[in-house]
Structure formats: structure tokens, C-alpha cells
Image (cartoon, rainbow, N blue to C red):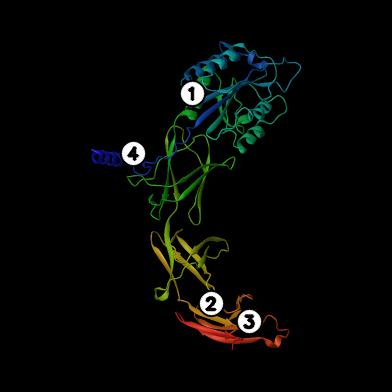
């Protein structure tokens, strides 16, 4: 009975082990990214001029009624927060008070009723401090790493306090606080004055005002996708597995980083990006390729093509000699800028074209106009090195030179704390070593020896040895 119990325990343990073990029992899931929250700040004009007649009622009454209707339609939208800033409603005009701007309803979920209540009780009173209100809006958006911030400015007039709405908007965008604002102008076309502030909609009547609100909300909330086609030499989207950075064109801030991929059908993957921004895309090929001022169509799928034809390049030594830890500097032909430092035994992709390569062996080898072609592996071959073992019995100062017809060219300084020997990998050729013991007080103690290095062979060079 006792043995039967032990057997049952072992069987139960083996049965439960996959569930308990983190490898066998669970499929590791990547942590879910937080959902993107859209935050819309309505900046509403309640200056005295909003009492002006507009079709069948005042501009103020029509605007508050239509905006309230929009708020009703947003009541159950997920991942959306709203806020309301009003200007011109606290102080009568005259006298002019250019600080008359207040965040009446801060950002929160399900606060449409609060915003509608404020719209019902406020009254047009004062002046129009648009630039001041936009500058204050920077603090209306609490810090958030997973939010996209949008401003909708509704106004019937221009700046009246000497501020610069264009500069205020540029400041908000350059700091990445908000995307490009939307402006709805009531009763009169202010496009020329507001085009620098953001995307302007002219509302000369109620219908245009309603349509403007619908278009803005659609652009803001409707999902937008895109794909980036990395094109080969034949303009087919076959290039992939390279990093891409999306920068906001206005602020220069990084918006997204992706590693380009192809889906199961061999097509470029679909990306979810914000349609309200304009992007400068950098594809981190070697050298990088870019596409600036990329605009998306909200609510639609946008396809962007970027020329990125690539081939491969690697190195080899004659006789299939193994060479590791040998850096090779890559530059575009005729240019000084270093594009990459590639190890000798690596294979790397480059944009098709010609390159100058500096192989940091001793002596350095410069290979010019090496051509990389589409999807082909280019091999750069160098002679296999030989070995020079420089022996000495004392510390000292010395240098290694390569002997050429024009004389000696310095190559390497010996280590003055190396007492016995120093091993150097050298390309085949004629060399000379010049050495003086560290504690000799006369240059006459300088000794020099010439020697030749052959591929795959070891040459011993003895300096001040018995």
C-alpha cells in the first residue's frame, strides 16, 4: 500500500510539472502595450462678438448647441478624454482684459455632461486672447506617455490682445505637446490669418459648422493604417528587416520606431500610426535613406514607397585564412564620412552603389570603388597575413616601418613595457624595426633590422638579445 501511494504521488507530480514549470506550463506573453488615449481640448470663444447675429440666432447660441450635439455623439467613445477651455467670458469689455481665459472642465473620462453644463451657463463678455489661451493650453494636458493631444479652436474673430497665435501654436507643436490644431472660423473666412496656426475650416453657416466638426472628429478618431514599401532595384517591395524611425516633421520628436517586416503573404506589414501628424521617415539602412513630409489620409490605408535597394558585402583572406577582430571602415566612394565599421568575418547589407573600404590591418589596405549590387554578395579579398615576432630582452622605445621605394613609412610603435616579445600580424612585404633600450642615454645604442613577411609564415626578429 505504501509503495502504491508513492507511485501515485510520482505520477501526480509528473502530471502537474508542466503546469508548474515556467517553460513547459506557460507560453510567455509579451506585456500588452497601453491603449492610446485621444485627448481633445475644445478652446471656445465666448468673447462679446459671439453675440453677433448668424443666420437664425446668435453665433454663440448656434455654436454651443451644435457643439453640445457633437458631445452627445462622443459620450460612449472608448479611450477618449475631453476638456474645455473658454476665453472672453469672465470679464466684460470694455475695459479689455487679455488674461480672460480659463480651463473650465479639465480632462476626464465621461465628462461630456460637465462640458455641456458649462456651455449652458457661460455668457459672452470680453475680448479675444487667442495666443494667450493657446499658451495656457500647454498645461491643460497632464503628462501622459500613451496619449495623443488635439486642440479644436472655435472662434468668430482674430487675436485682439497683440499676441501671436501662430507662434503659440508652433511652440506647442515643437515641444510635442499637441498635434497640429484644428480651427473653425464662424461667420467669416479667416483662413489667411489662421493657416499658420493649424488646419482651418471655414463655417459660413450652420451646415458648414456641423460638417467641420464631423470631419475633425473623423480625422481624429477613425483608425488609419499605412505600409512602407522598401523598394529594390526593380521597384518591388522586397527589402525588409530594417529599422525605421518616424519623426514628427514639425517638432522633430520621435513618434514611432518599427522593425520593418513582411507578413505571411510576403507583403509589407500594416502599421497603425497617427493620421494627424506629418512624418519624416528614416530607414536605417547603411547608409540611411529618408522620405520627408509624409502625410496620411485619415481613415484610409496609405502606401509609402521608399527606394532602399540593398546587397551584401563581406571579406576573405587568400587561402581561406581565418581573420577575426579586424575592423574595416566603410565609406561612400569619394567621401570621408564613415558609414560603418564592419568586422572582417561579418556579412553586412548596404545600399547598392560604390564604396571605399579601409581595412585596418598592418599596414592598412585601401580598396576603392567596391560595388555592391542588388541581392548579391560582394567579396573583398586580401592576402593572408604573416606573423612577425619581435623579441628583445629589455624595455625600450621602437617603431615598425614598411620599406617602400620612396623610403620608410611609419606603421606601428612598439610597446615600451613589453620585455620579451611582441607578436604582430602583418601583410606580406618588407619591413624594418628600429629600437633603443629604455635606459640607454645615447642615440648611438639604436639598433635596426630589416625583415620580410610572407603569407602564412612566422618571422622572428631579435633586438638586443643574446
Question: In the rendered structure, which disc, 1 or 4, sits on the residue that comes first in sequence?
Answer: 4
Question: In the rendered structure, which disc, 2 or 4, sits on the residue that comes first in sequence?
Answer: 4
- State the CA–CA distance, disc 1 to disc 4: 52 Å
Looking at this view, is 433 or 46 the one in front? 433
Q: Are the residues flagged by discs 1 and 2 in contact, CB closer than 8 Å?
A: no
- Identify the image quadrant of residue 417: bottom right
- State the CA–CA distance, disc 2 to disc 3: 16 Å
* Relative side of 405 to 168, left or right: left
Question: In the rendered structure, which disc, 1 or 3, sits on the residue that comes first in sequence?
Answer: 1
**Picture coordinates of residue 96, whole percent (x, y):** 75, 19
Image height of 10 relative to 287, above or below: above
Q: Are the residues flagged by discs 1 and 3 in contact, CB closer than 8 Å?
A: no
Are there few (<14), some (14-19), or many (20+) residues within 10 Å of tag 2?
few
Task: Work out whether residue 26 can be spotted.
Answer: no
Q: Which residue is mark 1?
A: 214
- State the CA–CA distance, disc 1 to disc 2: 76 Å
Q: Which residue is mark 4?
A: 19
- State the CA–CA distance, disc 2 to disc 4: 57 Å
Circle number at residue 394: 3
Q: Which residue is mark 2?
A: 423
* Relative side of 160 to 244, left or right: right
Single out the residue that lies furthest toward the front.
Answer: 2
Q: Are the residues flagged by discs 2 and 4 in contact, CB closer than 8 Å?
A: no
Q: Secondary structure at mark 1?
A: helix
Image height of 405 relative to 146, above or below: below
Query: Which residue is found at the position 51% from the left and 53% from the top?
Result: 288
Number of the front mark, 2 or 3: 3
Number of the front mark, 3 or 4: 4
Amino acid at each position: 500500500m505504501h509503495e502504491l501511494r508513492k507511485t501515485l504521488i510520482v505520477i501526480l507530480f509528473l502530471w502537474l510539472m508542466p503546469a508548474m514549470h515556467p517553460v513547459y506550463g506557460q507560453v510567455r506573453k509579451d506585456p500588452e502595450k497601453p491603449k492610446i488615449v485621444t485627448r481633445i481640448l475644445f478652446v471656445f470663444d465666448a468673447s462679446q462678438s459671439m453675440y453677433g447675429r448668424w443666420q437664425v440666432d446668435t453665433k454663440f447660441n448656434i455654436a454651443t448647441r451644435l457643439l453640445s450635439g457633437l458631445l452627445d455623439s462622443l459620450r460612449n467613445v472608448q479611450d477618449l478624454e475631453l476638456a474645455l477651455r473658454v476665453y472672453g467670458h469672465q470679464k466684460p469689455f470694455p475695459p479689455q482684459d487679455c488674461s480672460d481665459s480659463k480651463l473650465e472642465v479639465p480632462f476626464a473620462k465621461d465628462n461630456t455632461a460637465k462640458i455641456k453644463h458649462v456651455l449652458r451657463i457661460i455668457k459672452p463678455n470680453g475680448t479675444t486672447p487667442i495666443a494667450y489661451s493657446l499658451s495656457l493650453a500647454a498645461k491643460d494636458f497632464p503628462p501622459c506617455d500613451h496619449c495623443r493631444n488635439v486642440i479644436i479652436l472655435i472662434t468668430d474673430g482674430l487675436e485682439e490682445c497683440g499676441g501671436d497665435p501662430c507662434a503659440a501654436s508652433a511652440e506647442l507643436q515643437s515641444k510635442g505637446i499637441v498635434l497640429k490644431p484644428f480651427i473653425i472660423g464662424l461667420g467669416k473666412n479667416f483662413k489667411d490669418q489662421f493657416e499658420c496656426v493649424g488646419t482651418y475650416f471655414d463655417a459660413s453657416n450652420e451646415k458648414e459648422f456641423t460638417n467641420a466638426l464631423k470631419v475633425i472628429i473623423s480625422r481624429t478618431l477613425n483608425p488609419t493604417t499605412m505600409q512602407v514599401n522598401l523598394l529594390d532595384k526593380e521597384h518591388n517591395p522586397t527589402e525588409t528587416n530594417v529599422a525605421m524611425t518616424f519623426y514628427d516633421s514639425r517638432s522633430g520628436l520621435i513618434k514611432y520606431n518599427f522593425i520593418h517586416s513582411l507578413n505571411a503573404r510576403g507583403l509589407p506589414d500594416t502599421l497603425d500610426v497617427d493620421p494627424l501628424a506629418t512624418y519624416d521617415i528614416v530607414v536605417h539602412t547603411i547608409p540611411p535613406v529618408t522620405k520627408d513630409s509624409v502625410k496620411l489620409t485619415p481613415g484610409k490605408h496609405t502606401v509609402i514607397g521608399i527606394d532602399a535597394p540593398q546587397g551584401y558585402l563581406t571579406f576573405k583572406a587568400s587561402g581561406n585564412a581565418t581573420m577575426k577582430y579586424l575592423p574595416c571602415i566603410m565609406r561612400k566612394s569619394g567621401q570621408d564620412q564613415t558609414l560603418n565599421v564592419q568586422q572582417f568575418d561579418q556579412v553586412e547589407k548596404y545600399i547598392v552603389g560604390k564604396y571605399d573600404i579601409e581595412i585596418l590591418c598592418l599596414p592598412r589596405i585601401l580598396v576603392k570603388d567596391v560595388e555592391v549590387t542588388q541581392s548579391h554578395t560582394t567579396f573583398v579579398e586580401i592576402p593572408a597575413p604573416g606573423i612577425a615576432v619581435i623579441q628583445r630582452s629589455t624595455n625600450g622605445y621602437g617603431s615598425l616601418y614598411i620599406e617602400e621605394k620612396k623610403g620608410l613609412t611609419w606603421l606601428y610603435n612598439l610597446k615600451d613595457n613589453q620585455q620579451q616579445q611582441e607578436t604582430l600580424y602583418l601583410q606580406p612585404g618588407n619591413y624594418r624595426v628600429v629600437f633603443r633600450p629604455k635606459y640607454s642615454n645615447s642615440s648611438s645604442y639604436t639598433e635596426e633590422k630589416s625583415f620580410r613577411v610572407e603569407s602564412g609564415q612566422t618571422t622572428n626578429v631579435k633586438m638586443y638579445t643574446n
